[in-house]
Image (cartoon, rainbow, N blue to C red):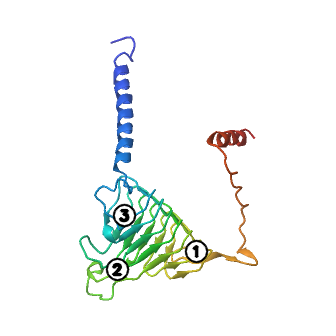
């Protein structure tokens, strides 16, 4: 037995670390190479793919691209599904089916299923695993399996400037106004007025903006202090260190 137990383990540790670094470098390269942009659309041929928009790799299920419009500077996370039509290969007519405005963010694992018109307004942000659909199963015939019955479709509109929390579900026929906040896990249907917060399943309005009285009920936490214009990453790091010490 060798006196030093690390004599034979050191090369194994070195190889393991080297392999670990190589795998991570390789995966970062694959992510960069597999991302979809207007300059490098790959196999995907969207009706519009705006400049600055990026679909992270790996992408989720994507079909019906000729009827999908993506605005400028959108961020589409990994494993996001974007579909137009009930299945690939359909002719959906002359008009777009799914439209994302400029600056839309779809978090990792989100799904946008547009069997009929779905519009997401500019600068709407979605957390991970948000589900937006214009189609729902029907169960009119009790003698048939639900999955075999013809589904119902109804257009969906999400106004500009909204925030949809993790796991939120937006059902067919939903019409969200401007700057609506959807709480995590909420299930939204019907009309939601501008500048309101909805939560629950089914979602209901729990806070709204009044031009005279402000937010009702009032927001209990203090407003965040915005960063000053022109702050550098180094200055931001220095501020964080001061906060930790203070």
Numbered circle sitting on residue 144: none
Q: CA distance from mark 1 to mark 3?
A: 24 Å
Reading the image, the residue beneath label 1 is 178
Q: Residues within 10 Å of mark 3 (few under 14, many from 20)?
A: many
Given this view, does label 2 or label 1 mark the residue nearer the observer? 1
Please name the residue shown 39% across and 29% down the image: 17
x, y percent for residue 78: 40, 55
Helix, strand or loop for disc 1:
loop
Query: From what the image shows, is residue 26 above or below residue 203?
Result: above
x, y percent for residue 222: 73, 60
Which of disc 3 and disc 1 is earlier in sequence?
A: 3
Snapshot quadrant of residue 225: bottom right
x, y percent for residue 190: 50, 82
Helix, strand or loop for disc 2:
loop
Query: From what the image shows, is residue 116 above or below residue 185?
Result: below
Reading the image, the residue beneath label 2 is 137
């Amino acid at each position: 037995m060798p006196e030093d137990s690390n004599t034979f383990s050191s090369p194994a540790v070195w190889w393991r670390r080297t392999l670990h670094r190589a795998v991570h470098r390789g995966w970062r390269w694959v992510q960069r190479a597999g991302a979809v942009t207007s300059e490098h659309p790959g196999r995907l041929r969207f009706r519009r793919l705006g400049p600055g928009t990026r679909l992270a790799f790996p992408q989720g299920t994507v079909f019906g691209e000729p009827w999908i419009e993506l605005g400028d500077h959108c961020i589409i996370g990994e494993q996001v599904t974007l579909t137009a039509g009930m299945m690939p290969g359909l002719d959906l007519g002359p008009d777009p089916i799914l439209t994302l405005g400029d600056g839309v963010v779809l978090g990792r694992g989100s799904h946008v299923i547009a069997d009929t018109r779905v519009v997401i307004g500019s600068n709407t942000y979605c957390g991970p695993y948000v589900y937006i659909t214009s189609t729902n199963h029907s169960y009119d015939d009790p003698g048939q399996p639900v999955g075999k019955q013809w589904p119902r479709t109804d257009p969906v509109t999400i106004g500009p400037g909204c925030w949809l929390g993790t796991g939120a579900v937006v059902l067919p026929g939903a019409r969200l106004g401007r700057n609506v906040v959807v709480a995590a896990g909420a299930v939204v249907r019907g009309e939601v007025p501008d500048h309101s917060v909805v939560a629950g399943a089914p979602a209901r309005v729990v806070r709204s903006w009044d031009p005279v009285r402000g937010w009702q009920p009032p927001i209990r936490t203090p407003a965040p202090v915005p960063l000053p214009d022109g702050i550098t990453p180094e200055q931001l790091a220095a501020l964080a260190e001061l906060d930790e010490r203070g």
